[in-house]
Image (spheres, helix red, strand yellow):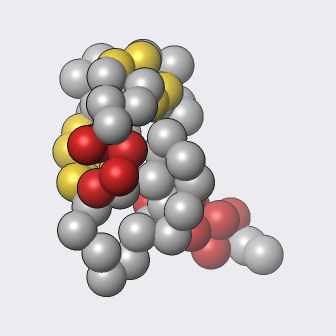
Amino acid sequence: MSESDSASTQSRTCVSCGIDVSGTNAAAFDCPDCGTRIRRCATCRKQSNLYECPDCGFTGP
């Protein structure tokens, strides 16, 4: 897998649980610290599962 394929795959997964969120009701937002795009599935959002930015380590609810 090339580096761009890896980045593309990462951008389509929930940062909390790791499931593929393409075509689902996922939230996408920029990390408050570094601006990296973060995606979270509806289940993790509803359960307020913690997430961690893969680039800077920022954590949030």
Quadrant hosting residue 11: bottom left
Q: Quadrant of the N terminus?
A: bottom right
Q: Is residue 40 rendered to the left or right of residue 6?
A: left
Q: Relative to 1, does residue 54 appear above or below in the rendering?
A: above
Foreground residue among 11 and 45: 45
Q: Is residue 53 rendered to the left or right of residue 30?
A: right
> From this viewpoint, is residue 16 visible?
yes
Residue found at x 23% / y 23% = 32
Query: Residue 38 at x, y = what percent?
Result: 35, 45
Query: Residue 59 at x, y = what percent?
Result: 42, 18
Q: Quadrant of the C terminus?
A: top left
> From this viewpoint, is residue 4 visible?
no
Quadrant hosting residue 29: top left
Residue found at x 43% / y 26% = 50
Query: Residue 18 at x, y = what percent?
Result: 57, 54
Residue found at x 28% / y 56% = 42
Residue found at the far bottom of this picture: 23
Foreground residue among 10 and 43: 43
Q: Is residue 17 rendered to the left or right of residue 46?
A: right
